[in-house]
Image (cartoon, grey):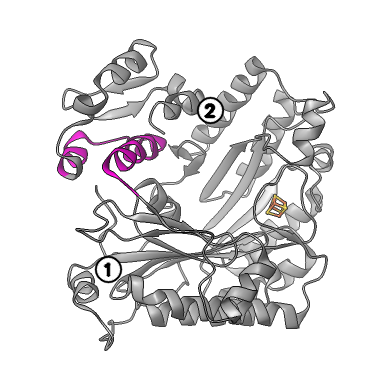
Amino acid sequence: MKTRPAGEGPRYPGGVTPSAGRADESATPSNARAAEAGEDVGVYVHIPFCERVCPYCDFAVVATPRLAAQRDERYTDALLAELSLRQPTFAGRALASLYFGGGTPSLLRPESIARVVEAVSNAFPPRGAVEVTLEVNPSTLERERLPAFRSAGVGRVSVGVQSFDDGVLKRLGRAHRAVEAHRTLEACRATGFDSLSMDLIYAAPGQSLEGLARDLDAAIAFGPEHLSAYELSIEPDTPFATAAARGQLDLPDEDTAVALAELVEARLAEAGLSRYEISSYARPGFEAVHNRRYWRRKPVLGLGSGAVSNDPLAPPKRPFGARVANLRGSDAYLECIEAGSTAEDGPAEVFDAATARGEAIFLGLRERRGVEAAAFEAEFGATPQVFYGATLDTLAEQGLLTRSVHGDLALTARGRLLSDTVFAYFV
Ligand code: SF4
């Protein structure tokens, strides 16, 4: 698979300063090989605190109207302790991306973010400029901290706008209103962040085509370099799931949801934001480096409650890698880390060849570039057609998938609309 070459930084300003790399005295032979081979790692840091819990959310979050300094410090200490515990698995790798997600990571004080940025870049000395992203929700507190976050090493902000329509925001149970979103986006630009991403939700309760068009126009007016547009999904065991089961959510029907999805792609394309992944749009050169690691099955170290790590390949025992998730509860996570152990929620899922092949297909199809048959063959010994011939024939006949003369795979426009149906064949 093609990846951004180590040492070639993304075009984001700020972020972690490149270092020449330092010798790792504790390096094992395989760590030393990783360093020699120029292998890299992305680090995801989960901050579980949110001002309030939105009724559609099923992330590992905890309602925290005000994050006390002591609690902030305790959680940050735990993140650094976990980094020390888990660093040896990824030792010798260079930092390629650092992503603070949540939750609402900007509830953490800038000095805490700075501590984590410094510790992570010391653990994995980068070889070039590194994308450092912080998710921010629109609020006065977070807005005032933007300059300090920038000084802490954050180069890219991702603002959880969701909608510029107060009615939609209210029905989504969001804590902010449109005016806050406008002010936060303006403050991001005024602070000098020139890699700005925002999240929008479509197919929200009561949302019309006209309302979504206004949302898109408002978003485009800020000239974001990146935008993620997510169709609202109703997750089990959430208040929205209960309300939907009772028929109390005014959700769009299937045809309207398709029209909304088509509107998103068309409007953003007109504005120069091209769809490079199912939910992601970017100007050229601003595709999310960190998120791409997941679609390309590259190693990611996840720190914090509920965070997931994709461990590096470790032949011959784990030739297809492994995945491990941390405990979702922040108290349970803190107790484990403070007792000196990692906080894994059960044993790692070690991938066998069949699972890894399925993931390579459905994650690869998320990106517009699709799955390259030659790269797939190099990893698995045969092309996708050999393993999935009948399924690929069916999907192609249904107009969901294209195959090039070389056997490369990509979703069609219809396939992108029905991507969950396609992916289900490979999970
Ligand atoms: S702000 Fe985001 S992470 Fe927090 S509860 Fe709402 S949807 Fe979930």
Range shown magenta: 351-378
What amino acid is at disc 2? Ala
Dot label at residue 401: none
In depth, the one of 345 and 69 nearer the eye is 345
**Which residue is identified by label 1?**
7
Q: Disc 2 on helix, strand or loop?
A: helix
Q: Quadrant for residue 318, please give it.
A: bottom left
Regarding mark 1 in the picture, which secondary structure is present there?
loop
Residue shown at 27%/82% (left/top)?
Answer: 20
Image position of 37 with respect to 103: above or below: below
Task: Compare residues 235 and 104 and report the one nearer the observer.
Answer: 235
* Cα separation between marks 1 and 2: 35 Å
Seen in the image, is 218 located left or right of residue 402? right
Q: Nearer the viewer, mark 1 or mark 2?
A: 1
Looking at the picture, how far across and down is residue 136, in whole percent? Answer: 65, 61
On screen, residue 359 versus residue 377, left or right, reads: right
